[in-house]
Image (tube, coloured by chain):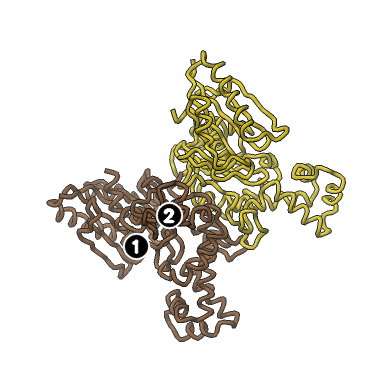
Chain colours: A brown, B yellow
Amino acid sequence: MPDFSIGVDLGGTNLRIAAVTGEGQMLEKVTFGSKGAPGRDQVIDQMCDAILHLSSKYKATGKFLGAGIGIPGIVDLQTGMLRKSANLPGWEEYPVRAEIERRLGARVVLENDANVAALGEQWLGAARGVSNMAVVTLGTGIGGGIVLGGKIWHGMNGMAGEFGHVTIEPEGPPCGCGSHGCAEQYASASAIVRMAREAIASGEAPSLAKAASSDAEFGAQSIYNLAIQGDEHARRIFRTFGRYLGIMLAGAINVLNLEMFVIGGGVSSAWDVYAPTMFEELRERSIVYAATAPIDPLRSGSLEKGKEEGVSARTESRNERKTIITRALLGSDAGLYGAARMAGMAE
Amino acid sequence: MPDFSIGVDLGGTNLRIAAVTGEGQMLEKVTFGSKGAPGRDQVIDQMCDAILHLSSKYKATGKFLGAGIGIPGIVDLQTGMLRKSANLPGWEEYPVRAEIERRLGARVVLENDANVAALGEQWLGAARGVSNMAVVTLGTGIGGGIVLGGKIWHGMNGMAGEFGHVTIEPEGPPCGCGSHGCAEQYASASAIVRMAREAIASGEAPSLAKAASSDAEFGAQSIYNLAIQGDEHARRIFRTFGRYLGIMLAGAINVLNLEMFVIGGGVSSAWDVYAPTMFEELRERSIVYAATAPIDPLRSGSLEKGKEEGVSARTESRNERKTIITRALLGSDAGLYGAARMAGMAE
């Protein structure tokens, strides 16, 4: 009878709740839409009802270890309150954790959503078995989470992993954070749309202009569709995207020397059109990546060991292990698994 | 009777060896010049003779815990060999640690010199009592070391902390590492000289041109001297230096959210002329720094506690702790202390 915990993903669009065993098996998942933009108290009601329902339903399966909640914002780990959250009006200055713990009568852990996604991919996804890794999520903006020694690296204030606001181009476009030329201004869904609008305004991208005027939902997805159909203007945008993502990752690799960076989030699926320039920049700009990336099978001994491809190509010697940049595997469930894991670990 | 260990700083210009107690008291320091550019075997002879001499001399004081050696290069922690060292020809592919352990009959730890400097500043210098910090050393190039939880963060291959090769200006000057626009190309002694030569070549810096032609040893120090005398061209170079150092630090703070960054190395002493632009960039470009930097004594409660200034102004709450950027305190002894500490800790 495996013990289980409950993971919650409190996203901008959905509220999702799942019961997950200590071995990583999902028992049941519940999804609430955000029709009518429910307020804070209504969301907490839904969440607590669902957690109580699931914890009671699977009580026979094993011990309920608690609930972990991934939240888009900066969490104060000591007080269990939100310090800052752009997408959750009314949640700041409110004792979120205390209130939920009171209703559940169980231990609750709050955590930033990018951090739980990192823990999820490290536990059951692309970085399974990799102790030191980071996730970079490419969505409307860029999120990030770092796992060191199998645990979330919070930094001093729970703010570590802000990869999106690393300066890539000092005189680049202004960013909502108050700076200029942040990675988020080049390698996010909103950056793709901005670059397309700029290309249209320049008059040099008629195909994009045509798509924008005929498609009421013109956005990153439409531009990706054009790119995979071979449209040169759309392809150029994703090459720029990959170039700047690569510059950002090169810096992070030089500083952290992690075993793996996992690229997740909605836009990460455009991998085929941005990855080539991303890897070009990594090879040029990261001495750490360059020193660890290319495994020469004749020297590394991996041929003899018959483990040539992918992650398993890493050999036993520390020196010859490569820095792996790869796609996330768990999609939007990464946060659910990570939140459940967090609740289970803290036990 | 305090136990002691021996720290070795194997620099490009000097070989220095010190006996240091477990409480951080230096018992004795020996310095060998590099006249005649001694070869590998001669350096190892000098080092082992001095270590044996010191360990026997202070045997009555306490237990000899071993020797730590800081080396300019990438150390393979498993084999105790140098993977790469620009300044130590003949040392790669040689069993350095095994040979020294054989001669001493004692345990020896090899470590990268920037990493031991970080550990030294964390143990006894500017970051005393700070568990999570980094040192950035500004010399001919830029070195770096990261300490997490009081221990050196090596990363996967012992290559973490390469702050100098983070891209700051994608189309900037070429770097020896193969990339372009690395931090090292803007915030190092060699960058200062390059920027001065560029200003001279442009014909717009007559004062620098005059100094360069009259000073046979024209270098970063001469340009600093001009700057503090008020020369506008020299000051501009240090403003650029500070700006790019600030951009690099802003990115590192956003990613790591460390409590403290300590700026060391020979060029760090020009603090008064580069720090203003460095702090400007930090405030603009790091949301983490901006969120944690300005302590409002009326809100933080530090006034009531009577701990207003400097490091001690950090309050008990995680939220209100500030990210501190400060100068190194131990100078060139940081590496000696850190190397001794490492040997003492591993016991």
Q: Is residue B337 visible?
A: yes
CA gap between label 1 and label 2 equals 13 Å
Quadrant position of residue B74: top right
Q: Is residue A91 visible?
A: no
Nearer to the camera, B42 or A218: B42
**Same subunit, tags 1 and 2:** yes
Query: In which quadrant is the C terminus of chain A drawn?
Result: top left
Residue, x 51% and y 55% (percent of image)?
A289
Number of marks in the image? 2
Nearer to the camera, B76 or B38: B38
Q: Is residue A234 above or below residue A252?
A: below
User: Residue B136 in the image: x percent, y percent?
Assistant: 59, 43
The secondary structure type at the circle numbered 1 is loop
Left or right, A67 with reference to B32: left
Question: Are there few (<14), some (14-19), or many (20+) residues within 10 Å of tag 2?
Answer: many
User: Residue B195 in the image: x percent, y percent?
Assistant: 74, 53
Q: Residue furthest left?
A: A60
User: Residue A121 in the image: x percent, y percent?
Assistant: 35, 56
Q: Is residue B33 above or below residue A12?
A: above
Residue, x 64% and y 31% (percent of image)?
B42
* Subunit bearing disc 1: A
* Subunit bearing disc 2: A
Left or right, A183 with reference to B205: left
> Going from the N terminus, do you reach mark 1 or mark 2 first?
2
Give amino acid for label 2: Met
Q: What residue did someone put label 2 on?
A: A260
Give amino acid for label 1: Leu
Nearer to the camera, A254 or B298: A254
Q: What residue did someone put label 1 on?
A: A329
